[in-house]
Image (spheres, helix red, strand yellow):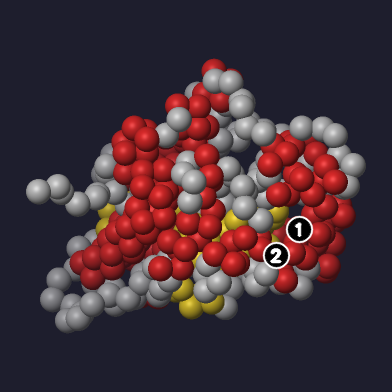
Amino acid sequence: MEGRLTLSDVEGLAAARMDPYWFAFLQGGAGAERTLAENVGAYGMWRPRQRILCGIESASTHVTVLGHDLGSPVVVAPVAYQRMAHPDGEEGLARAAAAVGSAFCLSTFATASPQDVAAAAPDVVRFLQVYVFRDRSVTRELIAEAVDAGFSAVFLTVDLAVVGARDRERRVTWTFPEESLPSVRRAIAAGATDDALAMMDPALDWAYLEELVASTPVPVVVKGVLDPEDAVLAAEHGAAGIVVSNHGGRQLDGVMPTLEALPAIVDAVGDRLEVLLDGGIRRGTDVAVALALGARAVLAGRLPVWGLAAGGEETARDVLELLREEVSIALHLMGCESPAALSSSCLVPAAR
Ligand SMILES: Cc1cc2nc3c(=O)[nH]c(=O)nc-3n(C[C@H](O)[C@H](O)[C@H](O)COP(=O)(O)O)c2cc1C
């Protein structure tokens, strides 16, 4: 009899099925990939406390993010070019997220448009990730299309002013027809002639965030915060939330792993905005640790995309459901009936 999928196996299944170029793109980090490795390793610095005889029937995994009740605390992170992982693409991963009551964040560099995703997964809680085109009208139109299509937040990614130095991408040949990305098509129609990354504005500032907040009818979340001072500035300039993120270790190598950055950021902002975190989420226990240290929810990037690559929408759904189940198991064994019961007192530092 064939065994069932585990979260440990999904990366290997993706590697076996994906084109080697796209797998390199998906896996890679910046520089010597220290931050990439430390994002994953940081969860091992904390140990959940095992609590007993707590009388819990079953632990809930519900959290509230930007006013949405989500059945899972794991949101699908924006990851570019999902159709390169599997023909089910963004539509398939959005449907997988809907099936487990999670939310889906669509990349600016998605191979599907906001309308496509809304049509394929009308029930999913959906957010649009924004890279800002030099031609602001392109970004405005993309956001307008998304808002019309029921996207309920904009995630402004701010840690990609320039692309990190990524060895794995240098070693393979880029073959993607960028003009097939709906957002890039939109920019070309408006007169852009550069390659897609050169179409983006590298010099955004806090005034832009304020402008975006003022002109956007849905909440704006700043993705890519790693410093408490920036977290406070994001609150002061009107962000409804932040994602503590280093872009999955793909940008500035050597920066702190996100879990290490989280506690000081949570302390600095208090209740002024919602704090989410991504980077290195591979198991349900990772999610429980991040939530205990103050994240309201987490985003996962590579893990659900490995699922998509391994077996399309169905395997992506299995991965998200397994993660949700593992969170429930972890909470139960930590003596917490729901994520709201988690706090730093549920953890102890690992002995070094
Ligand atoms: C292949 C790949 C493509 C990504 N594309 C985007 C993107 O288009 N926009 C964005 O904001 N973040 C992007 N990210 C970063 C993710 O949203 C997220 O921050 C990161 O993957 C979290 O780390 P994890 O992969 O360890 O879960 C990408 C990450 C990967 C691995």
Give the image location of residue 321, x and y in percent.
Answer: 33, 62
Residue at image position (54%, 53%) is 90
Q: Residue at x 85, y 46 (%)?
A: 189
Query: Which quarter of the figure is the C terminus placed in?
Result: top left
Q: Please tell me whether residue 21 is drawn above or below residue 235 in the rendered image.
A: above
Q: Is residue 95 visible?
A: yes
- Disc 1 is placed on an element classified as helix
Dots 2, 1 in contact, CB < 8 A: yes
Q: Nearer the viewer, residue 204 or 308?
A: 308
Q: Residue furthest left?
A: 1
User: Nearest the camera: 224 or 13?
Assistant: 13
Asked if residue 236 lies left or right of residue 45, the reply is right
Image-based side of 300 in relation to 2, left or right: right
Q: Which quarter of the picture shows residue 194?
A: top right
The numbered disc on residue 142 is 1
The residue wearing badge 2 is 146
Q: Measuring from the top left, give residue 252's x and y in whole percent.
A: 60, 34
Residue at 24% from the left image edge and 65% from the top image edge: 329
Name the image quarter holding residue 165: top right
**Callout 1 amino acid:** Leu
Name the spot of residue 328 as percent of width and height, x first: 28, 68
